[in-house]
Amino acid sequence: MRNIKQAAIFDMDGTLFQTDLVLELSLDDTFAHLRSLGAWEGETPINTYRNMMGVTLPEVWAALLPNHSEEMKELADTHFLESLIDNITSGKGALYSNVKEVFRCLKEHSIDIFIASNGLPDYLSAIVRYYGLDEWVTETFSIEQVDSLNKSDLVKSILEKYDIKKGAMIGDRLSDIRAAKDNGLLSIGCRFDFAKEEELAQADQVINDLIELQSILP
């Protein structure tokens, strides 16, 4: 019987990487920069961003800086990304518990591992490199790789590129769950920092720790 290729596709923020550890630092840094330019008054809108975790950065800046020019949004985006990468490479972030243990288990069971994220390529690469995830991850995909900026389309591109016939999408937000369902994959919701119960309710299964995947996927 021909082996059916199986994959585990992971979201990054709020699923593998504890983004909140560097998020506030980088957002504060970005808005401090905007204040220095006279382009922002008041506190950093960290709570607004926390409620938006999982969406694309253009959507973030549209919400946080609705009255600012596109040029200013691009400036904020660039500064934010640079600050995030600096914080990651200086060790201020962290993976969630058991990421590497689960990756090792999945590879031992011949399950290919991918990352599909709304994060930008340089940001994702910084995390993968710093934590040595490329030892297990076949390829990391950014939402920028699909014109639609739609997570379902991004996951579809992974399945087509690697001829994946079976698998699961693991993530903490509704876009991850929809991406799984739109592509005939098992949807596994992560009840982590940014997850919302009403979104998790739509997943096929929900986990509280990544280690639970060892009894679900292999």
Image: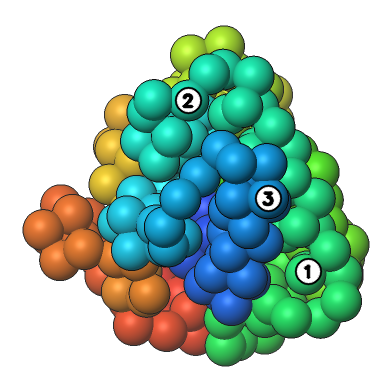
Q: Taking 40 as reference, is 190 left or right?
A: left
At 11% from the left and 58% from the top, the residue drawn is 198
Distance from disc 2 to disc 3, alpha carbons, whole Å, reads 15 Å
Residue tagged 1: 88
3 or 1: tag closer to the N-terminus: 3
Image position of 188 with respect to 108: above or below: above
Q: Which residue is at the front of the view, 145 or 32?
A: 32
Image position of 25 with respect to 59: above or below: below
Q: Position of residue 117 (x, y in %)?
A: 57, 44
2 or 3: tag closer to the N-terminus: 3
Describe the element under mark 1 as helix, strand or loop: helix
Q: Position of residue 209 (x, y in %)?
A: 42, 84
Residue tagged 3: 36
Residue 109 seen anywhere in this rendered image of the structure: no
Front disc: 2 or 3: 3
Find residue 68 and name its label: 2
Crowding near pointer 2: few (<14 within 10 Å), some, many (20+)? Answer: few
- Indicate the amino acid at tag 1: Ile
At 31% from the left and 74% from the top, the residue drawn is 191
Say if mark 2 contacts mark 3, CB within 8 Å: no
Crowding near pointer 1: few (<14 within 10 Å), some, many (20+)? Answer: many
Distance from disc 3 to disc 1, alpha carbons, whole Å, reads 24 Å
Quarter occupied by the N terminus: top right
- Indicate the amino acid at tag 2: His
